[in-house]
Image: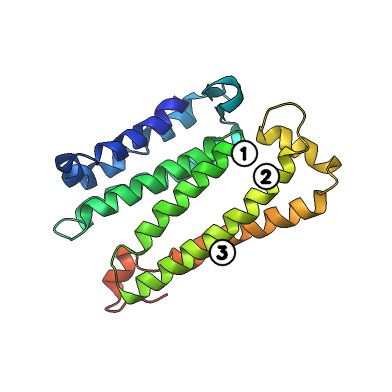
Amino acid sequence: MLAFALLFPLGMLLACLWPMALLRMPSYLAFAPIPAFVAVLLVSDDSPLVVGPARLHLTFALDLPGALLLGVAALLWITAGAYASPYLQGRPNRGRFAVCWLTALTGCIGVFLAADMVGFYLFLAMLTLGACGLIIQHETADAWRAGALYIGLGLLAETLLLIAFVLLAMNIPGDGLLIGDAAAALPTSPHRDLIIGLLIAGFGMKAALFHSTSGCHGPMQQRRRRRPQC
């Protein structure tokens, strides 16, 4: 179920390479998060998924806190997908919206499921890229400014997180890069204070970006206002 939760939206994203599938994809967006929600109901916290060779593998797992967060997120994505389908009827750039939406969704699910720092960082970057595409969907001047601000500060936040992850990896025994091992090694790290500061700054910027851009250029805002505002 962990694999299906990730592969289903990713498969829908890859299907967008075909023009006919891209044209119809906005009508099926609400189905993409359903496997993730089912995984929350069926997957136990002792069933990790390991993908790839021994030294380059990615690990996915779902514990109770992650399941709660993923369950809420999946319900929100299902609701958003159901709303997007009728809203996009007859509008330009429907296919691009579907691609960006599925990219952001796959990144979001991957962030909640990733149990190692490499996978977490990759899916976080995927989420940032997809969200930026959604922000500039309407291609107004305000949308382009918001998109440029989002991608610029998002890349800065991810750079801070990357430095923190590298410092954490230096203190993990063996070749593993599991987030749990990194958290256990943090208290004894000689760079503990720096790592904590980088993590707070990086995740804090990410949270602030989501809060500041979530109300801009969305469908509801476009209906309520003649001119999009941030």
Q: CA distance from mark 3 to mark 2?
A: 21 Å
Marks 3,2: beta carbons within 8 A: no
Say if 43 sits above or below 182 in the image: above
| Residue at the disc numbered 1 | 117
| Residue at the disc numbered 2 | 165
Quarter holding residue 28: top left
Marks 2,1: beta carbons within 8 A: yes
Q: Give the SS element for disc 2.
A: helix
Compared across the picture, whether 102 is left or right of 57 comes to: left
For label 3, the crowd category at 10 Å Cα-Cα, with few meaning under 14, some 14 to 19 and many 20 or more, is few
Compared across the picture, whether 50 is left or right of 16 comes to: right
Quarter holding residue 166: top right
Q: Give the SS element for disc 1.
A: helix
Please tell me the numbered disc located at residue 208.
3
Q: Mark 2 or 1 closer to N-term?
A: 1
Marks 1,3: beta carbons within 8 A: no
Say if 140 sits above or below 111 in the image: below
Q: Mark 3 or 2 closer to N-term?
A: 2
Amino acid on which the number 3 mark rests in the picture: Ala
